[in-house]
Image: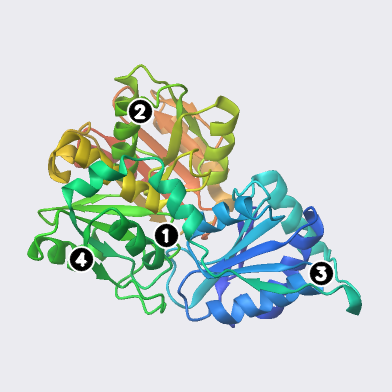
Amino acid sequence: MSKLIISVSGLRGIVGETLTPELACRFIASYAASIGPGPIVIGRDGRTSGPMLKAAIASAINACGRDVIDADVASTPTIGVLVRERSAAGGVQISASHNPPPYNGIKLFGDDGRVLDAQRGAKIRDGYFAGVSAWCPFDAIGSVHVESDPHQEHLEKVLDTIDVELVRSKAFSVLLDSNHGAGGLLGTRLLESLGCRVDAVGVEPTGQFAHVPEPTADNLMGIASRVAKADCGLGFCQDPDADRLALIDENGRYIGEEATLALCVTRAMMVGRTEGPIVINGATSSMSTIVAARHGVKTLRSSVGEANVADMMIASGAAYGGEGNGGPIDPAVGYVRDSFVGMAQVLDLMARTGKPLSELADELPKLAIVKDKAEISAERLPVIFERLQSHFHDAEAATGDGLRLQWSDCWLLVRGSNTEPIVRMIAEAETQEQAQALCDAAAGLMTE
């Protein structure tokens, strides 16, 4: 990322280079000018630059005549819950998600406790570029209220979705890897409240990541080995702002992020959450689609991005949803990806079935997904899409969000990233070789 990324969902950059306190304050001034009256919740992940940015952003919010509700270290879904519970005008999460330590960013929430949708986000982005602000006079400056316990209401909402006593009766042994991000505070509390024996790794929110923060198989090899050696029933691995969850089974096998949502959908169907469709995005594995279809439940696909998933969930009255990057979305808790929902509901599924995670994972539809990327300018995408459609002329093509090519037994999605200057290629097929071949073919066509 050689320049600051400003999009409808917020901004992200390198602290002290592309992201400075002055820039963050101007961005927040545009945000404060565009939303209704009321306080604004602020939270952050564990990054070392978080306290500095939080102080700058809180100052900017106060300078716009707004009060701040300071949650300090809290997960992204926790901020969404707090916005609703405190009747706030909005929320600001300071996090760069899975980016390396030099990065940080800002994610914005509306008064509904959801990450801003494209329309509202575009207004704030455009206001930033236009210099829009809402600075107030000296006698109207806001104040800061520090939350004594920002996690309790979120914890209660997650517990309300499962059979707590049943899970407690199993006394599961669990490894939690929060990688020194925001997830350890609530994660440990949740698992202990469910009667789990917890091997807590990296739960202190220091921002000193013990491994590359994106919870992928390569980055979690050490954690996977520890799960197996410690004789844990499973491992839960969060990203720094704890809206994504990857799973490791009792044998130390990386089950992954895609399986998180599929297992949560399996559990949702089991407990009768079939009153509406499920919603996933165009880059999410079809495992969830197949699981839902077995129960007569329809799947809708939105554009990539949790705001798009949430929009479609609300419009369609969906019973469940999420993204395949390990982010289940349960309307009973909030329309935000939530690793804590994933942890609680996977444990509930294990308790209800009496099956270990390895067996539950093996019962999922057998599909292989490959995620690749290429450093290609987004300006070339229209030409690339034409080339891909011409080459893969036997596929059903959709161009609402990048280019999605669908066959009867596989699919390929090619789209520009919203947060990085890259093009993502995601393919799913019955075998890893078939999915990789689709990505390789797409990459080859891009460079011709």
Q: Which residue is mark 1?
A: 242
Image quadrant where residue 133 sits: bottom right
Measure the C-alpha gap from mark 1 to mark 2: 25 Å
Secondary structure, mark 1, is loop
Q: Nearer the viewer, residue 249 or 372?
A: 249
Residue at 60 percent of width and 28 percent of height: 315
Measure the C-alpha gap from mark 3 to mark 2: 46 Å
Image quadrant where residue 86 sits: bottom right
Residue farthest toward the top in the current orientation of the protein = 296
Which badge, 4 or 2, comes first in the chain's sequence?
4
- Across and down, in percent, residue 393 comes to 41, 26
In this rendering, the answer to whether 301 lies above or below 420 is above
Measure the C-alpha gap from mark 4 to mark 2: 30 Å
Count how many numbered circles sit on residues in the image: 4
Give the label on residue 289, or none. Answer: 2
- Across and down, in percent, residue 308 comes to 56, 40
Residue 139 visible here: yes
Q: Which residue is mark 4?
A: 223
221 relative position to 383: left or right:
left
Q: Which residue is mark 3?
A: 64
Q: Nearer the viewer, residue 83 or 219?
A: 83
Residue at 20 percent of width and 41 percent of height: 350
- Name the amino acid type tagged 1: Ala
In this rendering, the answer to whether 78 lies above or below 324 is below
Within 10 angstroms of label 3, few (less than 14), some, or many (20 or more) residues? Answer: many
